[in-house]
């Protein structure tokens, strides 16, 4: 049971770090639906780098760097070129899904390196993720930088008038978001499950996206949601731990996705929206036009 | 921005003529193929030779052309499944889930009629084909309807919903065809039971009859968008849902309808590949690959700008490219996933080109007198 619990926390690390990236971006008004693509890139290039150089550190750095580059690209499309943010995000996802399938194919198989050391079985990345959640919360709600980011996401024209450079702020947030997504992917392929296989994420990125909506843009709720979904995910992989022999293991794999739909539905009811609906950044998904 | 005595400005296009849209789409396609050439260069392969091999295999080869046509029918149906919601400003990326549901329903008909196990049947094949088509369309429409309903009623992001449904349908198929599932092949190879040979789809000029269905759908959809009230409502909703609702267009009905229609067509795509393509006639073990291929529908839809007739040549071209990509991958000893890489490169190029569809770059000469008295303005 301890092992299952630990494994769930490991899984939640991946949801949490990717989700924190998305949360930062969304707070500044940039919606990136291509999380899964950025994660696949970070995971694949991180895996390739680590395997060919034998260095975990380089693997994580490359994963973050490629994520940051994709964030920059998303920023360029959606901020400078004013392409619809959904279109650009879908582009990143399909680019990631398509290109990493080809790039990673020669590396298919296990990583073949010593596992990253753990503390009582717990990966150090969980601690990092929790610290990151705290840091993101602190920066967003307690510092002037956070105020700047939030104001850009709420009402960019007012932010601009008060002397904030909207485009620059959004660019930085989008790059930061991409770096965290890339890191999260690299943690998946280097620590959580160090075996490369094509399109191995199977929906982690999209669940992370749903979790950000679920979190009401609050890093601590995101932390809670990630732990919850990390547990669901592990349960769906090991149903025999709780209810042995009840349903086919394939049916169990559907469960986290069904729960995500249920949560989204619950959050969209009038009852819920009237109470907490105002948390959504007002300018989310809208390009900013400077007149 | 200024350059010398010229001012360069980005101006949002008010309208885009068909000719200009066509020109931009052709340029986008050429740029994407040029960019993809670098994938060959990186692998140490002459891109011209590679493209020549791709095109000659896909379009001028007795073995490759039927593959291209089967792929084309599939992609065209997936494209239609994408563009109907797309014209309403909604993203149906649930084609994989919808086509899995459609395939399961089509094979479910055989299962219910108990045809899969015995090789003969007392019913006319015509009736059974009709039932399979109808079941595929209905099941996939129902899958699509979930996304449409949640979007219309609760405004839930349709991308997340369709993606969740994709994964759910993916695992449902695994459950049905593997490890003792109801549709498992008696040989236990992780695939579904096979269609009896009496039910192999009739061929027209060597292609499954689904070709006619796909082409007819193209004409019908073109007519729908251009001439009917529903088509107008979908376009109006796509332009601006709030404004459309003032004009009495329901913000609930349109998302629901476009996802039902799109889903139904995606279901036909599933039926086509697993129930009508010669040599398949079962839900294959690698069914996930066909789900992934469905995303080519997004690209065809974007490059044809949601035009059902323009989609036909585009789907034919990309059908051929994806078939040829897989072929040269083996022929030239490249690593797995060349057709996936092409998908990615095409997509990101098209995203960049969305900019040119929306904006034009206007350069105007700055006249001396106006720039001098700027303070009065």
Image: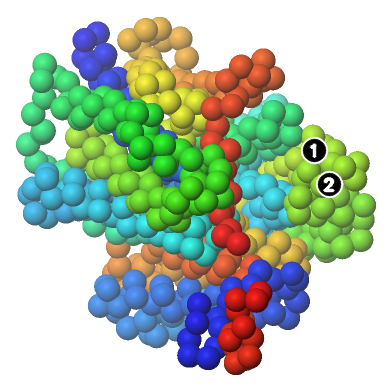
User: How many numbered discs sit on the rendered protein?
Assistant: 2
Which corner quadrant holds the C terminus of chain B? bottom right
In the rendered view, would you say B356 is above or below A42? below
In the image, A28 versus A129, the foreground residue is A28
Q: Is mark 2 on a helix, strand or loop?
A: helix
* Mark 1 or 2, nearer chain start: 2
Image position, residue B252 (x, y; %): 79, 34
Report the residue at 23% width, 27% height from top: A131
Image position, residue B16 (x, y; %): 73, 73
The residue to which callout 1 is attached is: B251
Q: What element carries label 1?
A: loop
Label 1 packing within 10 angstroms: few (<14), some (14-19), many (20+): some
* Mark 2 belongs to chain: B
Label 2 packing within 10 angstroms: few (<14), some (14-19), many (20+): some
Residue B71 seen by the camera = no
- CB under 8 Å between discs 1 and 2: yes
């Amino acid at each position: 049971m301890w092992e299952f619990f630990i494994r769930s926390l490991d899984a939640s690390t991946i949801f949490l770090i990717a989700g924190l990236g998305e949360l930062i971006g969304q707070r500044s008004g940039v919606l990136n639906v291509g999380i899964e693509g950025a994660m696949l890139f970070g995971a694949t290039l991180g895996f390739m780098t680590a395997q060919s150089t034998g260095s975990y550190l380089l693997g994580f750095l490359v994963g973050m760097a490629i994520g940051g580059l994709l964030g920059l690209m998303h920023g360029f499309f959606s901020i400078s070129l004013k392409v619809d943010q959904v279109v650009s995000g879908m582009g990143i996802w399909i680019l990631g899904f398509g290109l990493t399938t080809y790039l990673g194919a020669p590396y298919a198989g296990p990583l073949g390196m010593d596992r990253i050391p753990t503390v009582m079985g717990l990966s150090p990345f969980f601690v990092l993720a929790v610290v990151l959640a705290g840091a993101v919360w602190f920066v967003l709600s307690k510092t002037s930088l956070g105020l700047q980011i939030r104001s850009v996401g709420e009402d960019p024209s007012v932010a601009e008038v008060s002397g904030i450079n909207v485009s620059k702020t959004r660019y930085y947030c989008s790059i930061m978001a991409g770096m965290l997504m890339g890191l999260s992917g690299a943690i998946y392929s280097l620590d959580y499950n160090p075996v490369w296989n094509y399109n191995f994420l199977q929906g982690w990125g999209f669940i992370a996206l749903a979790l950000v909506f679920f979190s009401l843009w609050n890093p601590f709720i995101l932390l809670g949601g990630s732990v919850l979904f990390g547990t669901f995910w592990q349960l769906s992989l090991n149903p025999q731990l709780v209810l042995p022999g009840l349903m086919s293991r394939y049916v169990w794999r559907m469960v986290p996705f069904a729960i995500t739909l249920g949560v989204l539905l619950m959050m969209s009811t009038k009852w819920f929206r009237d109470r907490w609906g105002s948390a959504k950044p007002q300018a989310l998904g809208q390009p900013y036009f400077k007149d | 921005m200024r350059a010398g005595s010229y001012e360069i400005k980005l101006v949002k296009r008010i309208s885009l003529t068909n000719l200009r849209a066509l020109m931009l789409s052709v340029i986008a396609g050429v740029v994407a193929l040029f960019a993809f050439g670098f994938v060959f260069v990186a692998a140490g392969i002459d891109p011209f030779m590679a493209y020549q091999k791709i095109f000659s295999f896909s379009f001028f080869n007795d073995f490759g052309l039927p593959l291209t046509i089967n792929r084309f029918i599939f992609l065209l149906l997936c494209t239609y499944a994408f563009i109907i919601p797309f014209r309403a400003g909604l993203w149906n990326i649930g084609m994989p889930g919808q086509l899995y549901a459609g395939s399961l329903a089509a094979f479910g008909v055989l299962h219910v009629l108990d045809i899969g196990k015995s090789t003969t049947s007392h019913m006319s094949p015509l009736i059974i084909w009709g039932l399979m088509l109808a079941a595929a369309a209905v099941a996939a429409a129902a899958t699509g309807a979930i996304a449409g309903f949640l979007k219309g009623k609760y405004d839930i992001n349709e991308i997340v919903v369709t993606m969740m449904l994709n994964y759910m349908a993916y695992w449902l198929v695994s459950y049905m065809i593997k490890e003792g599932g109801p549709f498992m092949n008696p040989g236990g190879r992780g695939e579904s039971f096979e269609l009896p040979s009496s039910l192999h789809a009739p061929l027209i000029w060597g292609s499954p009859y689904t070709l006619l269905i796909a082409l007819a759908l193209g004409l019908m959809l073109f007519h729908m968008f251009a001439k009917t009230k529903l088509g107008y409502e979908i376009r109006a909703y796509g332009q601006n849902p709030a404004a459309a609702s003032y004009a009495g267009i329901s913000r609930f009905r349109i998302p629901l309808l476009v996802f039902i229609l799109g889903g139904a067509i995606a279901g036909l795509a599933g039926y086509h590949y697993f129930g009508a393509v010669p040599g398949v006639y079962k839900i294959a073990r690698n069914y996930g690959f066909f789900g992934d291929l469905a995303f080519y529908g997004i690209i065809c839809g974007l490059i044809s700008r949601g035009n059902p007739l323009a989609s036909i040549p585009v789907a034919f071209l990309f059908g051929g490219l994806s078939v040829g990509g897989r072929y040269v991958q083996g022929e030239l000893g490249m690593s797995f996933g060349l057709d996936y890489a092409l998908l990615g490169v095409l997509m990101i190029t098209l995203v960049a080109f969305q900019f040119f569809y929306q904006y034009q770059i206007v350069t105007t000469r700055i006249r001396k007198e106006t720039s001098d008295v700027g303070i009065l303005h």
